Amino acid sequence: MHIYVLILLWTIFISHSQGQTALKEPNHLSTLISLDVTDQRLDMVLDKLSTQCNCYFTYDAKQINGNKRVSLSCNKCSLKTVLDSLLNNPLYNYETINNQIIIHPINTTRVKKEDSNKKFLILIGKVVLNGSSTPLPFASIALKDTYLGTMSNENGSFSLKIPEKHKNDTLIFSYMGFNNREIALADFPNSGIVELQEAVVPLEEVIVRSKDPLFLIKKAINAIDKTHQQKAYGFEAFYRESIKTNKRYVVYSEALINGYISDNNKTFSNHRVELIKSRKFTDIRQEDTVVVKLRGGLDACFQLDIVRHLPDFLGRDGLLLYHYQLSDMVVWQDQLVFVIEFKQKRKTSEAQFEGSLFISSSDYAILGAEFYFEPGKLSGSRNSFVVRKSNAIKVKPIQTRYKVSYIKINQKYYPQHVRGQLQVKVRKRREIFSKNFITNMELFYTQYSEKEINKVPRKDMFQTSSIFSDAMEYYDNEFWKNKTIILPEDDIIDAFKKSGFKIDITNPSSYNLK
C-alpha cells in the first residue's frame, strides 16, 4: 500500500466564501449574505435575511424561539452557514419550496433510545505523574477483563461510565514509560486523582538493544495473524474532529458511532458505520472569508489501523526503503517495548513518513506508532492534501501528525486510539498575510464485540468518505448520559462558553450543551 493512499483519504476541502459553496445546495441556501447584528431578536434577523434573499421562512414557534436574542457578523457567507450559526448548532434541516424555506427538526428516527432503567457509575478523574500535578495526556483507562474503557484528554482528565453490574471490578491505568496501576472501583479515590509511577528498565534488559531492528519488524509482521484480531468484529467508538484557526475553533464535531469490520478487511467498502448521535459547534465570524472542511476523517482513522492496512514502513516491499534504528526500550502495558525509529533512505522530492514504532518484546505484537511526513517536503505534495480550492487562494501544508495505539483483549490486540493532525497555511493571492488552520481527527474505541453490536441497516450507513461536520444529527441534553467519551480540552470548553453555549456543571462529565 502506498503511503499516499492515506493522505488522499484525509484531505481538506477549501473554498473561498465569495466563490462557489462547498456543497451543491438549493439556490436560496447558497445565496451569499452579509450581516452585522448585535443583540437582536431572532425573528427580526430572519426578516432581514428574507429581504436579502427574496424568500421567507416557515417554522414552528414552539421549536424555535423567535424572541431569542442573537448576534452575528459575517461577510458574504452562504445563507445555510448563517442559519446554522444563528440557530446555535444545526438541529434543523432546511427545505426549499420555491421562495419559501421551511425550517424543521432533523429526523431523529435513527437516534438510539437509551434504557432509562440502566444504572451507571460515573467516574471523573485525572491521571498525573506520581508526586506532582503534571498531567499524563492520552493515558489508557480500561475495565479489567472487559471491552470497556476510555482515555484521558490532553489535560489528563477523563470520564468513564460503567454499568452498575461491574461495580466490583477493577480499573487498569497504563501509560507509555510508566508502570500499570490497578484500582478496584470500590477504592477509586474521592479526589479523582490517579498517580502513575515511572518505570525503570532493568540494566540487563538494556543489553537487548543490540538486536537488529529490521529483524524485530519482520518478526512483528509475521506475528500479526497471531497477535492481532484479524477476524470480523463489531465496535462502538467515539469520534471527534475540529478545525481551528488562530487559537479559535471554527468547527468542532463529535459523535458516537456503531460499526462493523469484516474478516481480513482490505478496503473501506467493508466498513459499515452508523452515526448513533452527533453534534457540532460552529463559530463563524466576519473575518472568516475562507471555509475549510475536513473530508474523509473517519476513512483516514480506519486507514490508520496500520496492522490491517500496512503502510510502506511496515510493508514487505517497503522495508528496504527505510532506515530503522532501535532507539530505546520502555515499559508499556506492563511489558517491555522496543522503540524503533524509522526514516526513508532514499531522498525524494515527495514527503515521506518518519517516526517511531512500538513492538512488544514478549510476543512481537505491534503496540502502536507515532509518525509524520517530512515537513520540508510537504509543500511539493500540497495537491495530495487539498481536494478543491478557489483559484484566488494559495494553500501550503505545514505539518502532519499521526498516532495509533492498540489494546490487548482476550489474547488479541484491537485498535484503541487514533489521532491525526494536519496544519495548513492559507493565503489569498495579492495579500501579504496568511491564516493558519489546524484540522484534528480522533477515534477512540469504547466497546468491542465478536459480532455486530448493533446491526447497521444499509439505509442508515454513513459514508465515511464524506465531510463529517455536514452530516450532524439532532441531539438532546441526555446525549452523553450513559456513554463514555473523551472529555474536551480546556480550550474547547472556553470556546463553548465564549460562543454562548452553556455547560451543565451539575454533571461535568457529560458537558451537555444547552
Image (tube, grey):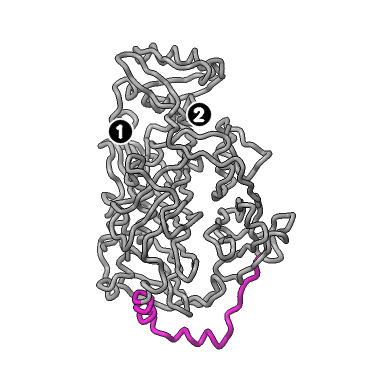
Q: Name the residue under label 2.
A: 88
Position of residue 60 measured from the top left corner of the image (x, y, whole percent): 48, 17
The front one of 123 and 455 is 455
Q: Is mark 2 on a helix, strand or loop?
A: loop
Q: In which quarter of the image is residue 182?
A: bottom right
| Residue 269 appears in the figure | yes
Examine the rendering and report whether any part of residue 488 can be seen: no
Q: Where is residue 447 in the image (x, y as percent from the top left)?
A: 50, 55
All told, the count of numbered labels is 2
Q: What stretch is highlighted in magenta?
A: 195-222
Query: Could you give the CA–CA distance between mark 2 and mark 1, rounded to whole angstroms?
Result: 21 Å
Say left or right for 192 vs 218.
Answer: right
Place of residue 29 in the rendered image (x, y in percent of width and height, measured from the top left)? 34, 23
First along the sequence among labels 2 and 1: 1
Q: What element carries label 1?
A: loop
In the rendered image of this protein, does residue 387 appear above or below residue 337? above
474 shown above or below 62: below
Name which residue type carries label 2: Asn
Marks 2,1: beta carbons within 8 A: no
Dominant secondary structure, magenta? helix
Relative height, residue 481 to residue 407 (above, below) = above
Residue drawn at (63%, 55%) of the image: 165
Reading the image, the residue beneath label 1 is: 23
Question: Does the magenta-highlighted stretch encompass residue 87?
Answer: no
Asked whether 216 falls inside the magenta stretch, the response is: yes
Q: Which amino acid does label 1 sit on?
A: Leu
Q: How crowded is mark 1: few (under 14 residues within 10 Å), some or many (20 or more)?
A: few
Q: Which residue is drawn at 31% across and 59% down?
A: 377
Picture quadrant where residue 514 is located: top right
Q: Determine crowd level at label 2: few under 14, some 14-19, many 20+ residues with C-alpha closer than 10 A.
A: some
In front here: 153 or 58?
Answer: 58
Q: In which quarter of the image is the N terminus?
A: bottom left
